[in-house]
Image: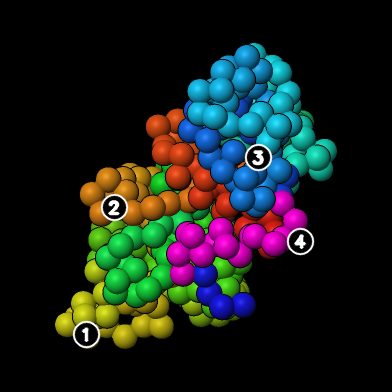
Amino acid sequence: MEPIRTLAGMVETLKGEAPRRVAVAAGHDEHTIQAAARAATEKIASVTLAGDGARIAGLCSKFGIDRKLFNIIDEKDEKAAGKIARDMVRNGEAQVLMKGLISSDAYMRLILDKECGLLPKGNVLSHITVLEIPAYQASHGKLLFVSDVAVLPSPDLPAKVKMIEYCAAAARSFGIEKPKVALLAASEKVSDKMPATLDAAVIAKMAERGQIKGALVDGPLAMDVAISPEACAIKGLKSAVAGEADALIFPNIEAGNAFYKTATLLAGAKLAAVVAGAAAPCILTSRADTEESKFYSIALGCRLAAARG
């Protein structure tokens, strides 16, 4: 499989395959319905909307969407609608869960529920964003996988290892045989005054000794040397990852979230996003995200579900 280099290219890989089954929790907001309709029309997803049937009907009428594109389960209460969608995934009736007009906290509680949730024992939940950044496309001709910008506030070392594993698995599903993963910090020098550099150094050594497989991992790396061959040359830094990163692992949510918003709001990046670590891909986008972002996120969930077989 040739590496997928754009989000539109990701969508194209899904066409001709059996549509993946997507269950939407409280699927009665306009951007979610528009994105779901596009995914159903392009035959990459079969979509169930669990939500307020009257609101769904009204939005379909407003945007000229055929309601027959969806399986609609009428449930006005957002939390109850979320449970319906979550249980469809749990019971094997759907392969991807998606957040609609339900709060992120309520959505995450559904996934994390100890009795009925979707989190396998020993896993952690982590957010993966796939970014198509114009400048990185121009310089490197590829997508950038980043974690974590939305779920883990301050991941410890074991959580960072899981983040690497999830990000690398996602990148491999895009045809990147051995993704290059950069562990970010403020400097590529290890210092006890910057705990992120200590974690990165330990994890890099773990990867060197084969404790992390299926990826090339290095760190600590500052952002410039992670993505710029020129910066590496100037600093005299040699690394199998530096200057060519496929994935960026942030030390905390503040760094990740600031990068994500800068990339989308100031650098014109397109995005797709899911929560990994659960029994199925769980799409988590902001209620303010565009129809395009939600559509690409559906496609990403379907891409990862396809990789599971």
Q: Nearer the viewer, mark 4 or mark 2?
A: 2
211 to 300, vertically: above or below: below
Q: Mark 3 or mark 1, which is nearer the start of the sequence?
A: 3
Front in this rendered view, residue 3 or 149: 3
Residue type at numbered disc 4: Gly
Disc 1 element = helix
Asked whether the beta carbons under mark 4 and mark 3 sit within 8 Å of each other, the answer is no
Disc 2 element = loop
What crowding class fits label 1: few (fewer than 14 Cα within 10 Å), some (14-19), or many (20 or more)? few
Q: Mark 4 or mark 1, which is nearer the start of the sequence?
A: 1
What crowding class fits label 2: few (fewer than 14 Cα within 10 Å), some (14-19), or many (20 or more)? some
Q: Mark 2 or mark 3, which is nearer the start of the sequence?
A: 3
Image quadrant occupied by the C terminus: bottom right
**At x 27% / y 65%, what residue is drawn?**
135
| Residue tagged 3 | 97
Image quadrant occupied by the N terminus: bottom right
Q: In the picture, residue 85 is in which quadrant?
A: top right
**Residue 233 disc label:** 1
Residue 165 at what x, y percent from top left? Answer: 57, 63
Residue 246 at what x, y percent from top left? Answer: 43, 70
